[in-house]
């Protein structure tokens, strides 16, 4: 192996923490990976990895070398790509992880338009509402909706997400309309299992306050909660990108319009310390333009 290939291999082993995982990705025997790392250590005259029966860990020298390898490989990749990529149409394969409801309802049409405009692009999507390790999963990009990024995330904000409290007209007729968030505790409220289920957040006088809620239904799918609300089972608290159509069609009414939910950011997150290819940058720029500072799904929000 030449020096750069050795560096790339070492970085992969350090990131995945396993010779076997790297061997599986490269479709080679584990012994091939261990020999190549051993050869690199012999060349450098120092141990880069501390081996045990359970795990691999970086030595002090290994941690320093890893940081330098990432810097060097990033510069090499950027130099090579910069000579040709930016003057060409985006091409190649994109592997993306993204949340279910937002991905299916809002991003799929955008991906379709992007692919139509860039015929040499192929896209592979993995839908998950849980945080995914981009490096271990081999992803080029993640779309995440959150109020805070994790330390070390390399990300660009491409939009914002607001939630609203909604219920079917039939439910409101039977049980009345809450006038203040503190009234919610007297209603059947159901929520999303990956968020805070026992209380909902509202912005009051510039501060975020949490109000208790309770109900007999919870789900890990925003669309399941949407269906339950349309069916008149109770009140739910969902992003505008999920309830937009139901509100426009008057299947759901927005409750508590004077009490806004805190805004979440919609982020494009990249694998850390990796050169971002032209095809990824082109897609992210396209999504940022399509979503914009005033997402179309937020048009249902009460004015004022």
Image (cartoon, rainbow, N blue to C red):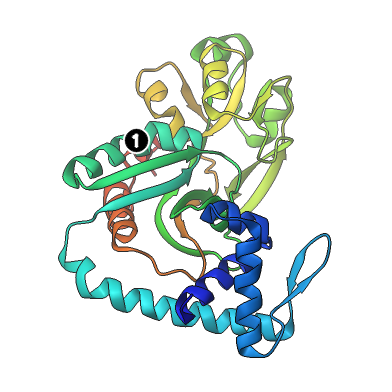
Q: Image check: 140 left or right of 205?
A: left
Residue name at image x 41 percent, y 21 percent: 246
Residue at the limit of the structure toward the bottom, as seen here: 45
Image height check: is 275 above or below 65? above
Residue name at image x 54 percent, y 64 percent: 153
Q: Image check: 149 left or right of 303?
A: right
Name the residue that disc number 1 marks: 108
Q: Does the image show residue 97? A: yes
- Of 104 and 172, the residue lying toward us: 104
Q: Does the image show residue 240? A: no
Q: Image check: 110 left or right of 4?
A: left
The quadrant the C terminus occupies is top left
Q: Tag 1, which secondary structure?
A: helix
Residue 187, image x, y percentages: 69, 22
Q: Count all numbered tags in the image, as a single digit.
A: 1
* Mark 1, other Cα within 10 Å: few <14 / some 14–19 / many ≥20: few
Residue name at image x 52 percent, y 75 percent: 6
- Of 80 and 157, the residue lying toward us: 80
Residue 160, image x, y percentages: 43, 50
């Amino acid at each position: 192996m030449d020096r750069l290939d050795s560096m790339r291999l070492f970085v992969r082993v350090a990131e995945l923490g396993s010779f076997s995982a790297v061997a599986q990705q490269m479709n080679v025997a584990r012994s091939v990976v261990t020999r190549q790392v051993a050869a690199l250590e012999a060349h450098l005259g120092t141990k880069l990895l501390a081996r045990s029966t359970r795990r691999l860990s970086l030595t002090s020298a290994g941690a320093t070398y890893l940081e330098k390898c990432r810097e060097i490989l990033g510069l090499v990749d950027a130099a090579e790509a910069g000579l040709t990529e930016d003057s060409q149409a985006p091409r190649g394969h994109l592997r993306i992880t993204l949340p279910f409801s937002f991905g299916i309802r809002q991003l799929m049409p955008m991906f379709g338009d992007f692919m139509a405009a860039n015929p040499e692009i192929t896209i592979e999507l993995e839908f998950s509402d849980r945080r995914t390790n981009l490096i271990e999963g081999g992803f080029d990009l993640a779309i995440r909706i959150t109020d805070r990024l994790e330390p070390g995330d390399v990300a660009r904000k491409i939009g914002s997400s607001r939630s609203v409290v909604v219920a079917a007209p039939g439910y409101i007729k039977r049980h009345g309309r809450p006038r203040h968030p503190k009234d919610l505790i007297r209603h059947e409220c159901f929520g999303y299992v990956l968020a805070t289920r026992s209380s909902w957040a509202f912005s009051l006088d510039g501060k975020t306050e949490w109000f208790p809620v309770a109900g007999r239904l919870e789900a890990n799918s925003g669309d399941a909660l949407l269906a339950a609300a349309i069916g008149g089972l109770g009140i739910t608290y969902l992003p505008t990108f999920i309830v937009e159509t139901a509100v426009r069609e008057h299947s759901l009414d927005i409750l508590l319009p004077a009490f806004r939910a805190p805004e979440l950011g919609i982020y494009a997150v990249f694998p850390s310390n990796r050169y971002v290819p032209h095809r990824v940058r082109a897609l992210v720029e396209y999504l940022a333009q399509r979503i914009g500072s005033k997402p179309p799904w937020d048009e249902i929000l009460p004015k004022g």
